[in-house]
Amino acid sequence: MKAIRRNIRLIAFVLIAALFSLIIYGSYSIATLGTRWFTSGANNYANRVKTGVTAGSIFDRNQVPLAVTDANGGRIYHADARVRSAVVHAVGDKANNVAHGAETFLSEHLYAFNESYISRVTGALRGDKRRGNDVVLTIDSTLAAYIARQFPAGKSGAVVVINYKTGELLILQSFPGFDPMRVNDATKENPLQPFWNRATKWTSAPGSTYKIITLAAALERIPNATSAMYHCDGHLAVGNSTIVEAGGAVHGDLNLRRALAVSCNTVFAQLALTMGDAQMLKTAQAFRLNDHFLFREVVVEDSRYPSQNRTEREIAWTGVGQSALAVTPLHMALVASAIANNGVMMEPRLLLRAVSATGELKATFQPRAYATVASANTAGIIGDYMAEAVSNGTARGAAIRGLRVCGKTGSAQVDGQEAENAWFVGYIDNAQYPYAVCIAVENAGGGGMIAAPIARSIFQYLTARR
Ligand SMILES: [Zn+2]
């Protein structure tokens, strides 16, 4: 009898504990994921509210109108098809083909869901059709159209440009783009999937751009890492496989500064093996891999540090940015911007301000630090090595005379692809031009040849050196 009573008590305890955790999880997910749910196209309540409200306009950072509602209630986009196509993934489209563009993800502002009950009632009494707030995005649509002309024709990929001091996203661009006012069968059937926002949703191995994170791990975990000498024979046997260098290079004796500048695979594989998987994972987590990104204005796929099949071979390949690493272009832009910003990663932002129909300011921009990923000292050393990669290494294609540019290239190999994915991450080290970029071009070739020159043209544009 006693045993039964004890069991009943135990069961009751478990049930109550389960109920409590459900309540806590429920409140947590409403608080953190509310906007995601509320703005989803499947939310019938939100769709009903929207039909009673005229959507506000969307402007770029220079007040260029990107989306407006005309007199008949139709939604129209920028007059130039090239601009429409260049900003469509950031702005979104009325048919909701782009899953989380501003059109849907900022609908709280555009349809003034957050307006007070009283002002809704007084508006209704006056017989007005309610009008939502205008929003001003951080996006630069002229730069977006300029980048679209630089990006290799017929290729897919992404470009992100971010102010590393504030987190403002000047560019959040995916290729191929599409014209939101002329979506046809060709758009829908394009095998490169133009609706997909590769900047935020595509996760892939970042190739040698990941050496920035391996380097951060080495600087913080291996004593005297800055003065140690390493050796490269052009190949390194690990288990039953061999790590090799791009183009059959043999780098000989070199320190870490030179190893990053020439992107030596065998040295970075050695670093990973010296530190081991647990230490590499810790630094990856510090840089927010395996995190659950819940940014306020941008929906970003989580990045992953691999956890399966962790052989010596896989650990070595992880050190050079291959193995099963999966990172978005936006996240790699955040990595570069954290290095530029003394180790502090800012939250990426898309909204500069929201203004009501009567001119009342409804939301303003406040920068917010998201994470400290490395010490200021470590970030400074990495920046110095990245500057060497641009002035005297594989990232030379991004160099601009008279400007301190820091960068790292990547040429990621993907099974089943003819060519490599070309990557570049980097930034301008200058308080007047605090911009970081990530460029990724799929199935295109080496990062130094393909991606670094795009970064240079963006930096030239931003510093008016075109
Ligand atoms: Zn080497």
Image (cartoon, rainbow, N blue to C red):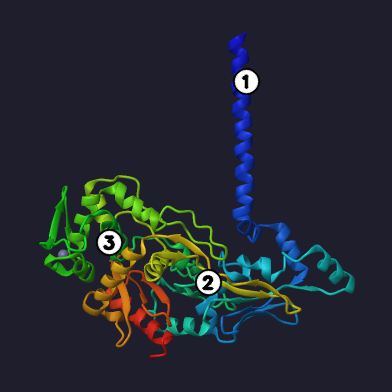
Q: In the picture provided, is 366 more to the left or to the right than 320?
A: right
Q: Which mark is residue 412?
A: none
In the rendered view, would you say 19 is above or below 78? above
- Residue position marked by numbered label 1 in the rendering: 9
The x and y percentages for residue 42 are 65, 57
Residue 150 visible in rendering = yes
Report helix, strand or loop for mark 1. Answer: helix
Q: Can you name the residue that lies furthest to the top here?
A: 1
Q: CA distance from mark 3 to mark 1?
A: 54 Å
The picture quadrant where one finds residue 99 is bottom right
Q: Residue placed at 59% from the left, 22% from the top?
A: 10
> Is label 3's Cβ within 8 Å of ligand 1?
no
Q: Residues within 10 Å of mark 3 (few under 14, many from 20)?
A: many
Mark 3 or mark 1: whose residue is earlier in sequence: 1
Q: Quadrant of ligand 1?
A: bottom left
Q: Residues within 10 Å of mark 1 (few under 14, many from 20)?
A: few
- Residue position marked by numbered label 3 in the rendering: 215
Q: In the picture provided, is 152 more to the left or to the right than 93?
A: left
The x and y percentages for residue 144 are 48, 81
Report helix, strand or loop for mark 3. Answer: helix
**Near-viewer residue (256 or 457):** 256
Q: Nearer the observer, disc 3 or disc 2? A: 3
Q: Quadrant of the N terminus?
A: top right
Q: Residue placed at 34% from the left, 60% from the top?
A: 205
Query: What amino acid does circle 3 point to?
Result: Leu
- Residue position marked by numbered label 2 in the rendering: 89
Q: In the picture provided, is 198 more to the left or to the right than 319?
A: right
Q: CA distance from mark 3 to mark 2?
A: 33 Å
Report helix, strand or loop for mark 2. Answer: helix
